[in-house]
Image (cartoon, rainbow, N blue to C red):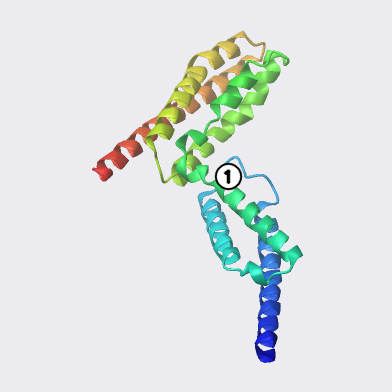
Amino acid sequence: MLSFVVLLLLGCEKERSLFNRLDRNLTRQWEIRFSEEPPLVYPSSQLKADLEFLAYGISLVELVDTSRLKSRQKTRYHELLSLMTAKETALRPYRKNPAFYDLGTSLSQLLTDTTLELNNRLQQISPVLDTLPAYYAGAKENLNYFPEDKVTLSLESQRSFFLVLSENLPDSIAKSTLDPAEKERLIGKSESCRLIVADYMAFCRSQLYESENTSR
């Protein structure tokens, strides 16, 4: 009986030590990967590595025998599991939700923000347009799942964005008092971005069509 108790205590101590080591390693990796907000353009290789880290980390934490942990460790166990699961949930739309990629809403809000002068609004919109090509290229590279409801939602939002780039933004540029060269640059950017948004819409439609054919 005494030997059984000794073995049990040794087993508990080993489990606690292993958990502490796991906690330190996962926390260190977390700080390296997630100390800042996700970038606007999430590189595909980074997204893949981050999701793999989270999936592997969660699987390791779930292997821990919590019955052998001390009270403080049990609390940390649940904190760690909750943190990693929430992060995985937050990153999942980058892969599985075409509607997640939407620059149109923020750009439209900025364009209609009457608390700012029109010239100021347009100057703030310009760098957003600069990031748009890489943003949608990243979306096409990251997405690997195209549920019909998400594609439909994405197409609706992108159509609205397309109209903003085709009509609202050019009209605002024309009404502004920016110098002619800057107006011309903005018009050029809006035309290029309009084509990119149209291409993203076509991409989503084609992927949905392929998914439907594959499931038949």
What percent of the width, then of the height, locates residue 199? Answer: 40, 31
The residue that appears at 30% across and 36% down in the rendered structure is: 209
Residue 13 lies left or right of residue 184; in this view the side is: right
What percent of the width, then of the height, locates residue 180? Answer: 61, 15
Snapshot quadrant of residue 125 = top right
The residue that appears at 67% across and 91% down in the rendered structure is: 3
Q: Nearer the viewer, residue 128 or 46?
A: 46
What percent of the width, then of the height, locates residue 6? Answer: 70, 87
The residue that appears at 62% across and 54% down in the rendered structure is: 84
From the image, tell me which residue sits under label 1: 90
Q: Residues within 10 Å of mark 1 (few under 14, many from 20)?
A: few
Q: In the rendered image, is residue 173 in sight?
A: yes
Residue 149 lies left or right of residue 45; in this view the side is: left
Up the image or down, 63 lies above or below 75; here it is: below
Residue 45 lies left or right of residue 111; in this view the side is: left
The residue that appears at 62% across and 20% down in the rendered structure is: 109
What percent of the width, then of the height, locates residue 28? Answer: 70, 62
Up the image or down, 92 lies above or below 23; here it is: above
Residue most extreme to the right: 72
